[in-house]
Image: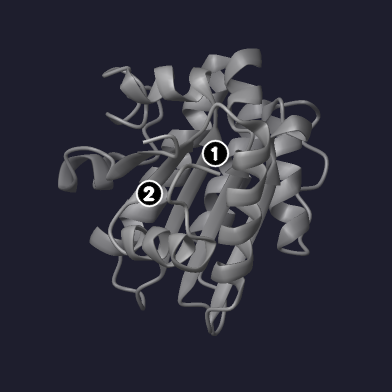
Amino acid sequence: MPAGFDSSTWSEQMISLLDDHHLVILSDSTSQRSTAGRLLQHRLGMLPETEVIDIDGTAALDMASFCQQIMAAARNRLGDSNGNGNAYLQRLIAHLRMLRRKTKRRYVIWHDADAMLEQDVATFSVLVNALLAVAAEHEHTTRSPLLLQRAVFIGGAKLGAYAEDIHGQFCCWLDDADDAPFWDVLSAVDRPRVIVYRMEG
């Protein structure tokens, strides 16, 4: 782990950042990323009234496999979408918008997020936009009881390059004017609230 890394306090620092932001956690070391992800998953899972959804990025390289992991974590099923990526996306959005009883916090931890990024930038961007936009909806445009929903993206150099792209979905909302499922939040929130944390400093 990085010099000065303290596993007893690091996860607490990350949880504090997640109060107001989504996180992109970067490291050049595969073992550091794996350890960081496990620590954060464990600590978040200890919080009361909290749902933690773990995504194995190496097994989520397209829309269908990503959505199936989220729904499996929720013990739900997407059903057969006949290979239709948009149908999977709409069901994913509907699931993320749903308030589960006694759940006040929902965290999605996307390990090895740059695996899909390398495979399909467009699909990665759509999914990032959906995760961050639904989180903003819960906070800014719904009258339901507040659900704090946050995403954590863990990866290496490719994810870091995407995080620095001013046209990427860590920096701006996706222009999806054709069917615009998030027009309410786009009009209320200027941009996603994302912090990039580099483990090497």
> Looking at the picture, does residue 105 appear above or below residue 68?
below
Residue at x-position 56% and y-position 82%: 101
**In this rendering, would 17 be left or right of 111?**
left
Instruction: Please say if 39 is above or below 120.
Output: below
List the single residue furthest toward the front. Answer: 3
Horizontally, residue 63 falls left or right of residue 20, namely right
Horizontal side of residue 48 vs 65, given as left or right: left
The secondary element bearing badge 2 is classed as strand
**N-terminal-most mark, 2 or 1:** 2
Give, as a three-letter code, the residue at label 2: His
Q: In the picture provided, is 65 more to the left or to the right than 133?
A: right
**Front-most of 142 and 65?**
65
Tell me which residue sits at (37%, 28%) in the image: 169
The residue labelled by disc 2 is 22
- Tell me the amino acid under the disc marked 1: Ile
SS under mark 1: strand
Q: Quadrant of residue 42?
A: bottom right
- Whether residue 84 is visible to the viewer of this picture, yes or no, is yes
Looking at the rendered structure, the number of numbered marks drawn on it comes to 2
Q: Quadrant of the C terminus?
A: top left
Q: Are marks 2 and 1 in contact (CB under 8 Å)?
A: no
**Spot occupied by residue 80 in the image (x, y as percentages of width and height):** 83, 40
Residue indicated by mark 1 = 154
